[in-house]
Each structure stands twice: as structure tokens, then as C-alpha cells.
Amino acid sequence: TQFTLNYDPEVLTITGLNSGTDSNPNIAAEPDAGTKIIVAAQTPGQIGVVVHHNGANDGTLLAQGTRRVLNVTFQIAENAALGSYPVTFSDAVFTGTSISPRGTAMPFTTKENGFMTILGPAAATVSITGRVLTPEGTGLRNAQVTLTDSDGTQRTVTTSSLGYYRFDGVAPGRSYSIAAASKRYRFQPRTVEPASHLADVDFIAQE
């Protein structure tokens, strides 16, 4: 599969090219099967790419339809203005074509352009705060609140005399489970995915 990718070099810089999840199918016919990414005529704002898969010659390397053949990683310029920037396909370096294992050219039927949207600088870390409350709404002291990330790493804090808790240094953009526990009450766990500081993530005890 080959194509030309165009982007704004004043805003975006390509820092990584890796084969996509659909460009390395589970084919055991050849032990040296694998995906090679060939980059040609790379200039600021434009890159010609060939994704070559060495696998079984049975015509089943890549099924018809929308497939993820390449992952492209961009770095955003520090002075980039907020907004949307196009990422488009063209025939400037390579025409948009796929070649079957039998050597048959198969032009793309569609070339759907995309864009990168810059919303603003991401926070390095965020905080999660809240209270642990009794059924009557009174703050519960010395309750244990545990934050668990998607990798299973846990952090535990103890609530203050008024039932407040706080987690600092939380990485944004990830999913977390938060659970509260005490000797007397039960609490329903919560799942959050903070993009910025989260407040009022409260737990109300169940009888």
C-alpha cells in the first residue's frame, strides 16, 4: 500500500511511523513474515510512504474495507495556534495504490482527508478531590480512599476530620477507579477519566 501524506510543517512534525494493527495479520505460513515501512521523498509537510507486508501469497494479506495500516505520530509546535489543521492525501510522491500479492494494482476507491485539532496545552498532571460522607451528609473522618489506574497501580489516602480527600500528581487522559472504604459503611466505586482537575468526586455511604 502506498500513498502521499501532506501536513502543515509550521505546526506538525512527524516523530514516528509504525505499522498499524491491520497491516500485520496473523499469517504463519512464512516465519519471516512482517511489515516494512519505506519512506521516500520526505520533505517538510509531505511524505511518501510504502507499507510492504511479506506474508503468504494467497491474496488474503489485507481484507477489503477500512483498515489501519500505519500509525503516524506528530509533535505539535510550541507556538502553534489553537484550531484545526488538515492532514491530506495526494499523488505528489506516490499515487494512492495497493498492490495485491499477485502484483495487481488496486487504486484506492476513496481518499478521505482528515485534520488535527489543537485544543490547548495539556496539563502535566491533575488533581482529584472530593468528600466521603455518611448517609446523613456528614463528613466521614479516617475513611480510606483508593485510586487505581488502568495498570493496577494503587494509591491510598485517608480522609480529613471533615471527610475530605485529595490525590495530586494524577496523569490526565487515563481511566481511574476510585473506591472508598470504612469499617462501618459501604460505598459504590466510581470511574473517572480526568482531562483537567476534578473536584466534588464525592462518596455517600450506603446503609
Image (cartoon, rainbow, N blue to C red):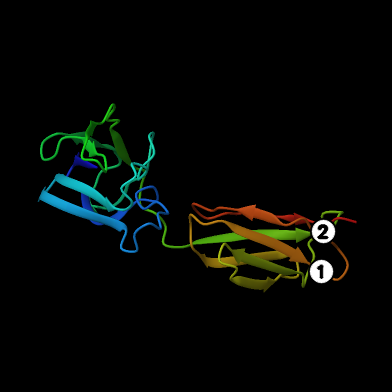
- Identified at 30% across, 35% down, the residue is 114
The answer to whether 154 is drawn above or below residue 82 in the figure is below
Residue at screen point 38% across, 34% down: 64
Tell me the amino acid under the disc marked 2: Thr
Q: Quadrant of residue 88?
A: top left
Q: Quadrant of the C terminus?
A: bottom right
Q: Name the residue tied to disc 2.
A: 138
Q: Residue at x 69, y 54 (%)?
A: 190
| Residue 10 shows in the view | no
Query: Residue 99: where, in percent of width, then height?
Result: 23, 39
Between residue 134 and residue 59, name the one nearer to us: 59
For badge 1, the amino acid type reads Ser
Quadrant of the frame with the N terminus: top left
Position of residue 110 measured from the top left corner of the image (x, y, whole percent): 29, 27
Q: Considering depth in this image, is 154 or 164 the residue closer to the camera?
A: 154
Q: Quadrant of residue 206?
A: bottom right
Could you say where residue 188 lies in the image, as x and y percent from the top left? Answer: 77, 55
Name the residue at 87% across, 54% down.
136
Residue 126 in the figure: left or right of residue 111: right
Rate crowding at label 2 as few (under 14), some (14 to 19) or many (20 or more) other CA atoms within 10 Å: some
In the visual, does 167 lie left or right of 32?
A: right
Mark 1 or mark 2: which is in front? 1
Residue at image mark 1: 182
In this image, 117 relative to 136: left or right? left
In whole angstroms, how far apart are the C-alphas of marks 1 and 2? 14 Å
Left or right of 133 on screen, residue 62: left
Which residue is more in the foreground, 79 or 57?
57
SS class, disc 2: loop
